[in-house]
Image: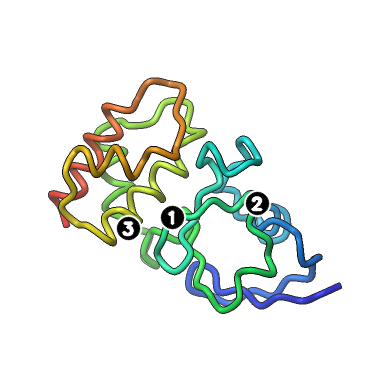
């Protein structure tokens, strides 16, 4: 079975798995990083989102063989080593932007990606960046407010 060396959340991990195993399965099943969720399995809901080289990417259909030397960040890797939450995580808590929490991983990761690229986005840019992430709990307005709050703190 092929062996892969992955750069995840600031450390290096080695896993043995088939070439076509989705990154999400490796994260959850091999590395016990359960922040990314299995949602639709079709890269359409955003629940499985991670950062690959700082860019929000769905992981449920991405084969592990396509990762190469890229740096992967899961929601578990956003907090600093001393446990301080990322400004986006703090803003989501402050604005109470979560209900059931299933979409939360993807919303946070997409927001971090957006703010990495554009620290002062407009409301339309926030909506556009979160377009891939589905939330059925109707917390969209709170999520947008959380991203605005995080933006102000950057």
| Quadrant of residue 53 within the rendered picture | bottom left
Residue pictured at 32% horizontal, 55% vertical: 86
- Mark 1 vs 2: CB contact within 8 A: no
Alpha-carbon distance for marks 1 and 3? 21 Å
Classify residue 35 as left or right of residue 137: right
Q: Position of residue 126 (x, y in %)?
A: 26, 42
Please give the name of the residue rendered at 63% of the width and 41% of the height, measured from the top-left corner.
42
Which numbered disc covers residue 56?
1
Query: The C terminus appears in which quarter of the rendering?
Result: bottom left
Q: Which mark is residue 61?
A: 2
Counting residues from the N terminus, which is met first, the one under dot 1 or under dot 2? 1
Q: Are marks 3 and 2 in contact (CB under 8 Å)?
A: no
Q: Residue shown at 33%/28% (left/top)?
A: 140
> What is the quadrant of residue 6 in the picture?
bottom right
Q: Secondary structure at mark 1?
A: strand
Task: Calculate the distance from the C-alpha at mark 3 to the C-alpha at mark 2.
Answer: 31 Å
Q: Looking at this view, is 10 or 3 the one in front?
A: 3
- The 10 Å Cα crowd at callout 2, few under 14, some 14 to 19, many 20 or more, is some
Secondary element type, mark 2? loop
Rate crowding at label 3 as few (under 14), some (14 to 19) or many (20 or more) other CA atoms within 10 Å. Answer: few
* x and y percentages locating residue 82 in the rendered image: 36, 65
Closer-to-camera residue (130/94): 130
**Helix or strand or loop: what does disc 3 sit on?**
loop
Q: Is residue 102 shown left or right of residue 152?
A: right
Within 10 Å of disc 1 (Cα), the crowding (few <14, some 14-19, many 20+) is: many
- What mark, if any, has residue 84 been given in the picture? 3
Q: Residue furthest right?
A: 1
Q: Is residue 80 left or right of residue 135?
A: left
The answer to whether 144 is drawn above or below residue 24 in the figure is above
């Amino acid at each position: 079975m092929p062996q892969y060396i992955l750069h995840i959340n600031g450390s290096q991990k080695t896993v043995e798995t088939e070439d076509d195993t989705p990154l999400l399965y490796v994260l959850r099943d091999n590395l016990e990083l359960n922040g990314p969720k299995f949602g639709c399995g079709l890269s359409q809901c955003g629940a499985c989102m991670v950062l690959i080289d700082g860019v929000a990417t769905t992981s449920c259909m991405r084969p592990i063989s396509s990762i190469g030397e890229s740096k992967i960040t899961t929601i578990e890797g956003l907090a600093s080593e001393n446990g301080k939450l990322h400004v986006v995580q703090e803003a989501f808590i402050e604005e109470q932007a979560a209900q059931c929490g299933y979409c939360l991983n993807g919303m946070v990761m997409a927001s971090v990606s957006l703010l990495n690229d554009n620290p002062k986005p407009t409301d339309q840019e926030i909506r556009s960046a979160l377009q891939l992430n589905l939330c059925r709990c109707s917390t969209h307005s709170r999520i947008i407010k959380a991203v605005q709050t995080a933006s102000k703190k950057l």
